[in-house]
Amino acid sequence: MAAITQPSRPGKSGSSPFMDALTANGTTNIQTSVTGVTAGKRKFIDDRRDQPFDKRLRFSVRQTESAYRYRDIVVRKQDGFTHILLSTKSSENNSLNPEVMREVQSALNTAAADDSKLVLLSAVGSVFCCGLDFIYFIRRLTDDRKRESTKMAEAIRNFVNTFIQFKKPIIVAVNGPAIGLGASILPLCDVVWANEKAWFQTPYTTFGQSPDGCSTVMFPKIMGGASANEMLLSGRKLTAQEACGKGLVSQVFWPGTFTQEVMVRIKELASCNPVVLEESKALVRCNMKMELEQANERECEVLKKIWGSAQGMDSMLKYLQRKIDEF
């Protein structure tokens, strides 16, 4: 299978705003640093994204969506199922901040109470989800690190618990890169279909945080301890085919027919008896709910501790500096 082409690395010039900030005292000039990272991140997105296709798709989805109105997601109520698409305006690359997470939770809660038989979760654009929005987070950590760390950990806890507690099937269509929390929530869903161009990575130690999304429990369960540790500790990147072989992905489809393949299968599932679908999921998940909720609580407590420390802040800054140096 052909490797996914990575963006080229332009030559570096001038001093780094991150290094200036860290040399001063680690946080004094963070706003300047964040501005530089945001600009570089936007260039990275522009280089990777198929602009004409993405713009047409975004326009089409937003124009045809009529049942609900959100800022960072699109929700389409279709025959027998609810389709939730990440399409973030408050973050780049469909990354997750508390506002995005609350909108997804709201859409899931609505789908749980209406006549939807299942939920299809996907994304607009060429990226599925880049995990936590560190730019958003660091901006707020400079004000009150302890308070904002607690708020972010609580937002993640509630977000992940919504997936754990959702009683109807959740089907995920991964169209592109799934990183961090964008990858770790996949085992909490019921079926995961991937575009062959998608890839999966949880480089937690690289960006200075511990695992989230119950990945400390679910990754070892589905792929074994050794493979789970490769992802969670060393940040190994999996292709779609590798992820399928390890049990993280159910099936992989050709990019040119990905949407059609997904919709055919979703419509077949949506034609099933809703009681049968819900009870079947309950039987599969019945012994896992408490274990997952406890794992989620533990993971969020550790995240809160790390983010509330000066070392945690510096680790995130250094990670973002490395990313901007790659652009």
Image: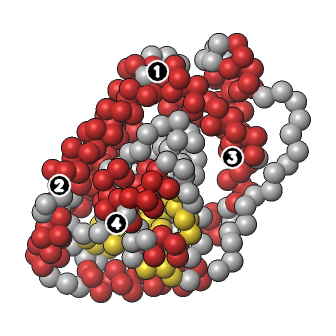
Give whichever of 62, 246 is nearer the camera: 246
**C-alpha gap between disc 3 and disc 1:** 28 Å
Q: The residue tagged with tag 4: helix, strand or loop?
A: helix
- Looking at the image, which residue is at 17% across and 70% down? 284
Q: Earlier in the sequence, mark 2 or mark 1?
A: 2
When asked about the image quadrant of residue 270, the answer is: bottom left
Q: Which mark is residue 309?
A: 1
Which residue type does callout 4 highlight? Ile
Q: Amino acid at mark 2?
A: Lys
Quote the CA–CA distance across marks 3 and 2. 39 Å
| Circle 3 SS class | helix
Mark 2: few/some/many CA within 10 Å (<14, 14-19, 20+)? some
Residue linked to disc 2: 289
Q: Is residue 238 above or below residue 21?
A: below
In the rendered image of this protein, does residue 251 appear above or below residue 150? below
For mark 4, what is the residue? Answer: 222
Question: In front of the other: label 2 or label 4?
Answer: 4
Q: Report the Cα–Cα distance between label 3 and label 4.
A: 35 Å
Q: Which mark is residue 42?
A: 3
Q: Secondary structure at mark 2?
A: helix
**Placement of 189 over or under 265, stated as above or below:** above
Q: Is residue 119 visible?
A: no
* Residue type at the position of mark 1: Ser
Quadrant of the image containing the N terminus: bottom right
Residue 231 pos. (x, y %): 49, 55
